[in-house]
Amino acid sequence: MTMSGQQDPSALRKRINTLERQAGEAKRSIAELRSRDALKTQFLSNISHDLRTPLAAIITHAEILRDGMLGELNPKQKESVTGIVTGGQHLLNMIDEILTYVRTAGDKVSLVRTEFSLADLADQVRMLNEPLAAKKHISIERVNGDDLPPVYLDRDKIQHVLGNLIGNAIKFTNDGGSVWIAFSRRGRDGDEICVEVGDTGRGIAPSNHELVFHEFAQVDASASRPHHGTGLGLAIARKLVELHSGRIWVESQLGKGSRFFFTLPLDPPGD
Amino acid sequence: MPPSARILIVEDSPLVVDAFRILFTEAGYEVDAAATVAEAIERGTTKRPDLMLLDISLPDGSGLEIMTALREHGSLPRATLAMTGHNDSKSRRICLDAGCVDVLIKPVPIGELLRQIERHLA
């Protein structure tokens, strides 16, 4: 720029060239980062598949021993082999969670919509989690929902969301506590269903309400934390809810339990 | 259980095949195994199995191709149980449409697997 305020054409051209070069470099960096990210996701997917197969063999071998098919075990042997099965299944669940994350991380996920009852689905997830809850003497109750209209959503994905929320609720609730599922209508003209999964557990500090939905985030990340997991459950839940054009959030305070909510549209957009 | 019913395990992991071989042999079945689509068609047409336990993802193609080939040859087992790594209703539907009697998610708890096999061979 000259002293009189007029622009020097050669300086201006030079400046434009510099900006264009920088923009080109930024584009190349973004493309490279995207490609590395895709590579990382593919690696995570491959390694998870490859871990799954030998683990399946270990679990099957251990079950054969546990069930006495190769001869009866004494009680201590049986307890030890049962530990192999339980540990193996726990590891398998974590691998499956990583695989689900990988599948939902890309933009390729599509919804397979069917008509179903949310209350029936909630009962199904509740029953699947009953054994886990019973071990901690935790009650799981569906408070309402018999009068809800049928929904037209991706049943598998909503089941996954409910499963993650109820699984977490049981995990973070002490012995003798309670977990519940409740439904309400929201939005203009009640065109959204709001699903609540609540518990009487340890609760989450308000400063962590957003963080818990981030990948690999675990609020209690101390080395001694008793609740191991992949740190992906809520990130997956958020992704699956958002795929349905819904929202997910938590209302909670430390020591006062947690209430997770997610909304689902009754009339899905035409996709 | 029918005496010495024959099970064909179609699975590309030798680790998983070894485990199933022990399980089914101990349960009184005759066991055969194949690791690829080509091998499974060869084994299945040479000696028709009573039941096929079918992994869907194989190195040389889809396990469902085996069913088509065995059907054309008139060697389809009485029942085929599909096995897949992940649970989704779309792949389940594809397997059932192809003629599988059920779709099991690997690893199948052995109690459930033996019950299913016994039921479909009855």
Image (cartoon, rainbow, N blue to C red):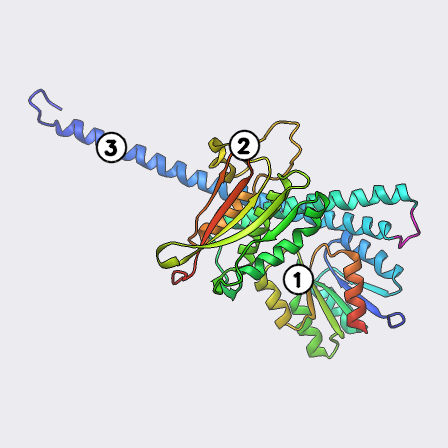
Which of these two is toward me, B36 or A58? A58
Who is closer to the viewer here, A4 or A171? A171
Q: Nearer the viewer, mark 1 or mark 3?
A: 1
Q: Residue at x 69, y 77 (%)?
A: B71
Viewer can see residue B49: no
Does the magenta segment cover residue A71? yes
Image quarter of residue A189: bottom left
Q: Chain of mark 2?
A: A
Residue assigned mark 1? B56
Q: Are marks 1 and 3 on the same chain?
A: no
Mark 2 or 3: in front is: 2
Secondary structure beneath disc 3? helix
Instruction: Find residue B32 and report its image quarter.
Output: bottom right
Q: Which residue type does callout 3 highlight?
A: Asn
Chain identifier of the residue bearing label 3 in the image: A
Main SS of the magenta segment? loop
Q: Nearer the viewer, residue A134 or B22?
A: A134
Q: Is residue B51 left or right of residue A171?
A: right
Identify the residue shown where x is 74% and y is 53%: B13
Q: Which residues are magenta?
A: A68-73
Q: CA distance from mark 2 to mark 3?
A: 55 Å
- Is A248 left or right of A55, judged from the image as shown? left
Residue B99 x, y percent position in the rendering? 66, 73
For label 2, the residue is A254
Residue A265 percent location from the top left of the image: 42, 57
Residue A198 visible in rendering: yes
**Type of amino acid under label 2:** Leu
